[in-house]
Amino acid sequence: MSLVEVSDAFRLPEGSEVKIRGWVAAKSEVGGIIFLTLRDGTGYIQVAGKRGIVSEEVFKNLKGVTRESAVEVEGVIREDKRAPKGREVSIKGLEIIALADKWPITKSAVRSPSFLYDYRHLSIRGVKSSAVIKIRWGIIRAAVEFFTQRGYWLISSPITVQSACEGGATLFELDYFGKKAYLSQSAQFYEEAAICALGKVFVIQPAFRAERSKTAKHLTEFWMIEAEKAFMDQEENMKLQEDLITYICRRVAEVNKGELEVLGRKFTPPEPPFTRMTYDDVLRFASERGMEFKWGEDIPTPVETLLSKSQSKPFFITDYPLSARSFYHMTKPDNDKVTLSADLIAPEGHGEIATGGQRIHDYETLLKRIESQDLPKEGFSWYLELRRYGMPPHSGFGVGVERLTKWIAGLKHIRAASLFPRTPTRVNP
Ligand code: 4AD
Ligand code: MG
């Protein structure tokens, strides 16, 4: 009798005697037979025991076991057309390892989506929640594969920082032994330092934004895949993002086929090249639909959403005005009001999934930019100093992991892409 996982039980020959540990996802009784659905993270399998066939003690345990109890089952693998996926384990032994109280998440108890998030520590056991988390891991794993194949080095940057990468408005401030510090909004500045040591680097780590807006695509804590490369211009940077997203989508469609099915998501990996349009094209698109906004402002969310709904694969919006961008962006050689940057927008209304651009690498230009925007020089001193010690032209980007998960998994709200989401109104559980 060997200890196996649920997924093994679908591979082993019929008649194999196995021991499986897991949780009781469901329980029912039909004609003296008790059926349990056992879950262990690798899958689900039906196990069954009949009064008179199993020992009195085993039947007593079967009777007494509650939903979500942790158990160890001993039994024989049988083919059975009536069982989900055609197999079940007929029980010979059942040990209750940890008996669960009455499960609080019932259809009648769930009155709002927020109820499920109040109980997120328990509700994550559902088949759909697990499928999303497995897709998220599929995305991260594919990104690691992609960058490994291309010889990028993974670095980790500090989370407690003093320089605001993406502006003061969304900083979480903390008291660092009497000094002001912030939670990192992006690893970008540290990547920029690291490329002069390592050439090309990437990170996969958390980012924080004190974003009050309650939308379906904002978290206050999320994960970002960021990459930065020396001697890379914005053109090459967009190509890199296109390659990365294409690779991730193909891998996830293949590796997470089962999870996408569980979610009822028909996902077709996009074929490159991705369409490009300029900020000015978007301005025209908006005004033709009576959704005008001023040149220089950020693209309003309803415009981005409408545009995103009109597309069937990701697309770039290029040539953003400097006034809508962070200070470090390089401007076009022939126009100092327009940056060498782009957003990558997911289709079907999901919206922005990545932002990238070419950075100012020249000392004087960056100093002037910092001064012209009245930014605190102290916080940026080391970032500026990098420009005095051999900083070549360079570019990079950041992709939001949960945004990408939301699109690929076809989720309505970004919080479903996070195991324990953080939003303006939720820091617990
Ligand atoms: O567009 P953002 O702010 O760009 C940066 O932080 C750059 N410094 C990245 C870089 O060039 N290294 O953020 C990058 C991505 C967004 O496109 C979005 O996918 C995600 O991070 N993101 C969020 N995801 C969830 N909730 C939020 N509040 C997010 N803010 C940004
Ligand atoms: Mg952005």
Image: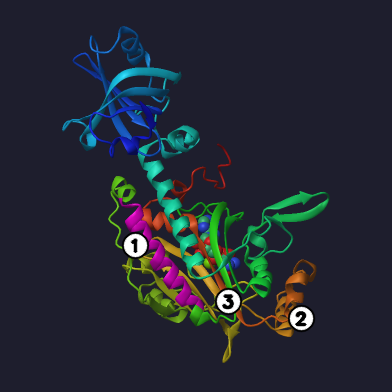
User: Nearer the observer, disc 2 or disc 1?
Assistant: 2
The Cα atoms of the two marked residues, 2 and 1, are separated by: 45 Å
Amino acid residing under circle 2: Arg
Please, what is the three-letter code of the amino acid marked with disc 1? Answer: Glu
Separation (CA) of disc 3 from disc 1: 28 Å
**Image disc number at residue 348:** 1
Residue at the bottom extreme, as displayed = 334
Is 216 within the magenta?
A: no
Q: Quadrant of the C terminus?
A: top right
Q: Amino acid at mark 3?
A: Ser
The location of residue 104, given as percent across then percent down, is 43, 25
Most distant residue in the right direction: 178
Residue bearing the label numbered 2: 388
Residue stretch rendered in magenta on the structure: 237-257
- Residue closest to the eye, 89 or 249: 89
Above or below, 87 relative to 387: above
Q: Residues within 10 Å of mark 3 (few under 14, many from 20)?
A: many
Q: Is mark 2 within 8 Å of ligand 1?
A: no
Report whether 383 appears left or right of 97. Answer: right
Estimate the x, y position of residue 287 in percent, counting from the top left: 40, 76
